[in-house]
Amino acid sequence: MPELDLSALVAIFAALSLGGLMKGATGMGTPVVAVPVMAAFVDVKLAVVVMVIPNLATNLWQIRQHGQHRLGEGFATRFALGGAIGALLGTWLLVALPVRSLSLTMAAAVILYIVLRLARPDFRLDIAAARRVVLPASTAAGVLQGAAGISAPIAVSFLNALRLDRLVFIATISIFFATMSLVQIPALLWVGLLTPQVLLLAALALIPIFAAMPVGAWLARHLSAAQFDRAILVLLTLLALRLIWSAI
């Protein structure tokens, strides 16, 4: 169990709460916000592993609420299957790569996500083209999730390009995230990274996340999504810079 001072605990609690807000509002965001913050204070591998259980729990909850809205004709299934395959490979990379490499990988993933969001805000992908590339795109996202705990640079950007309705987006991305977590959990148990102490930390992380998710859902109905999104991008930029600084 890592020893953290009060400032680190406050930062991690705030990040988990903010991740819960994002999850409730948009269907994604908990690992994107929480993992980089946690990695700035604890081992990157620990940050990635701790978030696997909360990722599964929150996405199962949203599948229960919105699963009927998922993209049909097997798209959501293929999207999730590719993520599961990639997550297995990414878990192997998590074990094999040194912490410094993981920190830089995570920073690069966050920066890539920010650049994609800013550079091509109006890009639209045709659904027919998306069906042709869904497996390679989701597999690449799964590798990133398994190794760095963040698949948003690929997965979220891919679905965003389809300009889906909010509920369709939430249902489809939740199935994707939950499937990856179901694959990661036994893999992490097998390699010895998901220990009883880590499971306790994961259980504690669920408290601020689930407390904030209903607030995020409320905010999505009453506040500007653009303003909320800009604040998150600023925060992620600062976190990526901190990760790079600590790694070099």
Image (cartoon, rainbow, N blue to C red):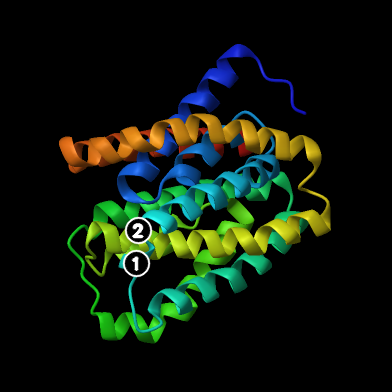
- Can residue 102 be seen in the rendering of this structure? yes
Image quadrant of residue 9?
Answer: top right
* In the depicted structure, whether residue 16 falls above or below residue 166: above
Left or right: 241 as drawn, with respect to 200: left
Q: Which residue is mark 2?
A: 66
Q: Which residue appears at 22% of the width and 62% of the height?
A: 165
Kindly indicate whether the residue at mark 1 contacts the one at mark 2 (C-beta within 8 angstroms): yes
The front one of 85 and 242 is: 85
Q: Residue 138 location in percent, x, y?
A: 48, 71
* In the depicted structure, whether residue 111 falls above or below residue 208: below
Element at badge 1?
helix
Residue sticking out furthest to the top: 6
Which amino acid type is marked by label 2? His
Q: Which residue appears at 64% of the width and 49% of the height?
A: 102
* In the depicted structure, whether residue 238 falls above or below residue 5: below
Q: Which residue is mark 1?
A: 68
Quadrant placement of the N terminus: top right
| Mark 2: few/some/many CA within 10 Å (<14, 14-19, 20+) | some
Left or right: 118 as drawn, with respect to 187: left
- Can residue 223 be seen in the rendering of this structure? no
The span from disc 2 to disc 1 (Cα, nearest Å) is 6 Å
Element at badge 2?
helix
Q: Residue 218 location in percent, x, y?
A: 25, 36
